[in-house]
Structure formats: structure tokens, C-alpha cells
Amino acid sequence: MKVGIREIITVAMEKAQKRGELSPGLLPEVVLEYPREKKHGDYATNVAMVLASRERRSPREVAQTILRHIEYDPETVEWVGLAGAGFINFVLTPRYWLDALRDAGSQGHRFGDSDVGRGKKVLVEFLSANPTGPLHIGHGRIAAVGDSVSNILGRVGYDVQREYYVNDTGTQMELLGRSVAARYSQECDQNTEFPEDGYKGEYIKAIAHDIRQQKGAGLLELPEAERIAALGGEAASVIMGWIQNDLRRFRVCFDRLFSEQDLYRDRCVHQILERLQEEGYVYEEDGALWFRSTLFGDEKDRVVVRNNGATTYFASDIAYHKGKYDRGFDLLIDIWGADHHGYVSRMESAIQALGLDRDRFKVILVQLVNLWRGGTPVAMSTRSGEFMSLAEVMDEVGEDACRYFFMLRRADTPLDFDLELAKAQGAENPVYYVQYVHARIASIFRKAADVGIEMPSVDEVNVERLTAPEERALAKQVAIFPEFLESTALALEPHRLTGYLQEMATLFHSYYNRHRVISDDRELTGARLYLVGVVQSVVRSGLTLMGVGAPEEM
């Protein structure tokens, strides 16, 4: 319906321009929102406020001008009016929402699908945690966001691939090797000092212990550099196994694991730096190679090869992203931790230097998760080993609560994760509150089956019997699901799903507490069964997009 209302408003503005009531020029895009207060209608736009400065009139005057030229179908639009400082509000007819309810029922699980993506190829690269330790709660949030973004884009017509970039070279991998080598030597009864900046978690001791059990003390005979590299490689392989197991349990699957080592094995990093140097974008200073990112608005130039000859992560990232473009993706979405915010401008600079389309590159930054238990924060530090792993959190609160809680806030907003709340079996727990809608409706259908009542088909149901205000509100919430998914996908803001589902749950629980679904009136019972069946289907779709289960019983 948003498309139709935008067209109504645009046509009205064009008519006003032709009659000289609005000044000539490019008209602004009509942005529609759902008013928070029901009295303000079903849709609202601030387009009059946007035009006001250009027209040198108050927003209300501009809105009144537009309203004079608005024409609409009374079968669909019940009322159009002016509110507040200049909002134009639309109220749709009950018939429109009931017809939309029919559409939802006829489409079943496909309701919400669209072709807005037109089959465009999208690569979503997310998580990409260094294989230096188990996944922690912050990694879990990134994984949940990335997977949900991918799911939503797929529902609205994009061809989506998920990719995990394995940082298996560089400084952190060397540090992992030195950490395990020190613990391995200690396992072999050697008095070896542990590196001050090493990874101190118990998992390092466990890996070293297992290697000692499997291979004995023979690795001590290797030269130090070879021993560190060998042990680092063994540890990375073990840790990646842990990560993949955790992700399977967390319901996150990748189409490809891309190894950073391949970029060096195939000389991609060398070739891209050579090209950039030939084109004048890389220069030498103080024995190091620098990329001229300031040419593209970055605050300073960036090192790509240190004065000791070691390449930086930025160098391999340039090669990696060049390869992404070469693979023919129409849109590249990177989902990074918030500590990488300064990395965005330098990657955009490199993309521009390579002559690639910067608009095809999007970054979603995910803020930290603050884990709480009983009013006390839970410390998280991978190197110190003082962190609660994602697996431990799943053990305590379950996969569903984990996935849902990670989506309660915008990705770029810090998130407080309350372990006790996530375990609560009541309405105060947001995931329980939503899942209970699905389970409660399943219970209604079991009771209906017990008395021999089935939900009517689309052709049989008389939706006109749904006259209660709560039924219209539920029908509206169902009807907006497709346009809601489209806007959520285009904004790359999957957290909106939790808001939508919370509203649906509030509407349903209120309805259930006021109205009996199964009654002696068979026609009304059929209409209400049809309504709650469609609600259940939409709730299940929303939960599935977030990787959350839809239980039949609770």
C-alpha cells in the first residue's frame, strides 16, 4: 500500500505545481511511516515539512495545499487529514485490511516474499573471527546480525551468499603460535616463560596438552620459528573446528570459508600492491610502503608493508575486496565489530583507488555486548581468558534466546544482555512473549480439532465477521508484513523484526484476553481461526528470519 499512497501524494504535488500553488522544481521523495498513535492514522508523511523551506511557508500551509489536490479510492482510503506541525495522515478502510488478510492466507508461508532485489547478487561477509579463541558473546551478535540480514535479503529477491573470511596469517596468528608453543614446552616439563601479551585462556593449555599427548615432545627439536608456526597452525585448525561447531549449533551456515593464506599463495596481495604502486597510490617512506588514502578523504595514509617487510591486514584486505568485485557481486556487505569503525574510510579509499564502485560496498558496524548476571557485569577478554563463550551462553539460556536477544537493538547500539531475563518464563522475557503467540495459537487449533472444527479455506472464510477493533489491528499488522520486510532489507536493519514481532505479540495477547476464538457461532469461529492462523504464520516467518524457533507448546 505504501507504493499507492506515495503515488497519490506525488500526483497531488504535481497538480499543485501545474496550478502554480507549489513552486516548480524536483519534488522530494515521499517517505511514509507508521504513526505511533492510532488516532494519527495508518500512514503518515512529513513531505510538507520537507517542502516548507523551499516554499517559504509553514508546513501546515504546504500540507493544506497538497491536501486540496489529493484524490483517492474510497474503497481503499477512508480518510486523509492534517495533523501536528504538518503531517499528512491516511486512514485505510476496514475492507482494505480484511482483503489483505485474505491475501496473506492464500499465500501461506510465501507471504512477505517479493522481487525488490531483482535477483541481484549479494555477498554478505560477517563474523570472520580470528581463529585465536572460542567464539564469545560479541561474536554471537555479529553472527546473528549477519545471518538475519542474509535471510531477509533472500526473502525479498536478492541472490545472497554468506562468506567467512579466515584471518589465518599475520601478527595474531604468530602470537597464537607463541602462546601454544610456550604451553607445549611447559607440558614437556620445560621451564619456558609465557609471552606477556599471549593468549592466556585455559583453552590454550588444553590445546597444548592434546598436542603433547598426540605427538609427544618431538616438536621441541624443531627450530623455534618452525615450532611456533607448526603449533600455531595446529591450534588454528582446532579452534576453527570449535567455531564451526558453535555456528552449526547457532544455526548459522556459510557458503564459503575464504582463507587469507590463499591471497598470499596466489600472489594476489603482491599483485595488487604492485599495481597500486605503479599507479602512484602506494609510496615508500622510512622503509615502509604506504597507501595514499588521504587522496580519498581518509585522515591519514595507511601502512601496507611495514619496514620489516611484513604486510599489514589492510594489504590483504585490499586484495580480498578486489577479488569480491571480480567475482561479480552487485552488492558487498561487510559486517564488522565496532572497533573497526576507523577501517571503513580506508577500505572505501582502496576501492576508489582501484576504480571500483564504492556504492556497491556497505558496512554494518556491530557494537559490543555487555553481559550481565545478577547486576554484575561478566568480563570478556580473549587474551586474558576471562570471557564467557557463546557456547556457554547457549548452554545457559538456549539458542533461541541468544538469537533473539542479539537483535533487540540496532546493530550500532551497545547491547545489554541479561542472562536472568533471557531465562525467564514469562511476558517480561521478549522472546518468550513472542514465541508464546505461536504456541498459544497452536493450542487453539488443537482445541478446535478436539471439537471437530477446522480452519476454513480462503474461499470459505467470511472475514467480514471480523469487526472488533482488535481484529482490525491484527489484520493491519499482518498486512504490512511484506512492505515491512522490504524496508527492513533496504535499510539493512534486521533488528526491526523484533519490534514488529513485539507489536504483533502485544496485539494478539490483548485480543486473546478479550475475545473467545472458539464459540457456538461457527461462522465467527471460522473467521477467527483464519485470523489467528495467519497471525501464527507471520510470527513463524519473522522468527525463522532471525533463526529463532517457533514452538508448538510452551
Image (spheres, helix red, strand yellow):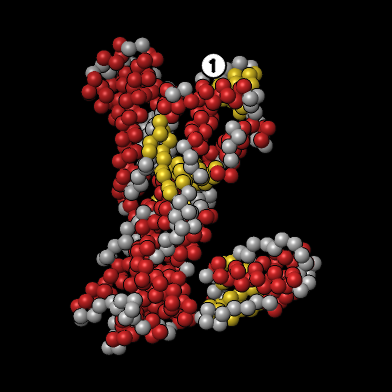
* Left or right of 182 in this view: 304: right
* Left or right of 216 in this view: 486: right
- Crowd class of label 1 (few under 14; some 14 to 19; many from 20; radius 10 Å): few
- Which quarter of the rendering shows the C terminus? bottom left
Disc 1 element: loop
Residues 138 and 458: in front is 458
Image location (x, y in percent) of residue 155: 42, 56
**Residue type at the position of mark 1:** Asn
**How many numbered markers are drawn?**
1
Identity of the residue drawn at 60% across and 68% down = 6
Identity of the residue drawn at 78% across and 72% down = 20
Image location (x, y in percent) of residue 498: 44, 60
Residues 158 and 255: in front is 158
Identity of the residue drawn at 29% across and 78% down = 456
Query: Compared to 503, does 351 lie above or below?
Result: above
Residues 512 and 200: in front is 512
* Left or right of 33 in this view: 392: left
Q: Which residue is mark 1?
A: 308
What is the residue that sits farthest to the front in this orientation? 18
Image location (x, y in percent) of residue 74: 56, 82
Query: Compared to 92, does 135 lie above or below?
Result: above
Task: Determine if residue 121 is in view.
Answer: yes
Identity of the residue drawn at 33% across and 85% down = 524
Quadrant location of residue 248? top left
Image location (x, y in percent) of residue 167: 43, 31
Residues 218 and 34: in front is 34
Task: Determine if residue 434 is in view.
Answer: no
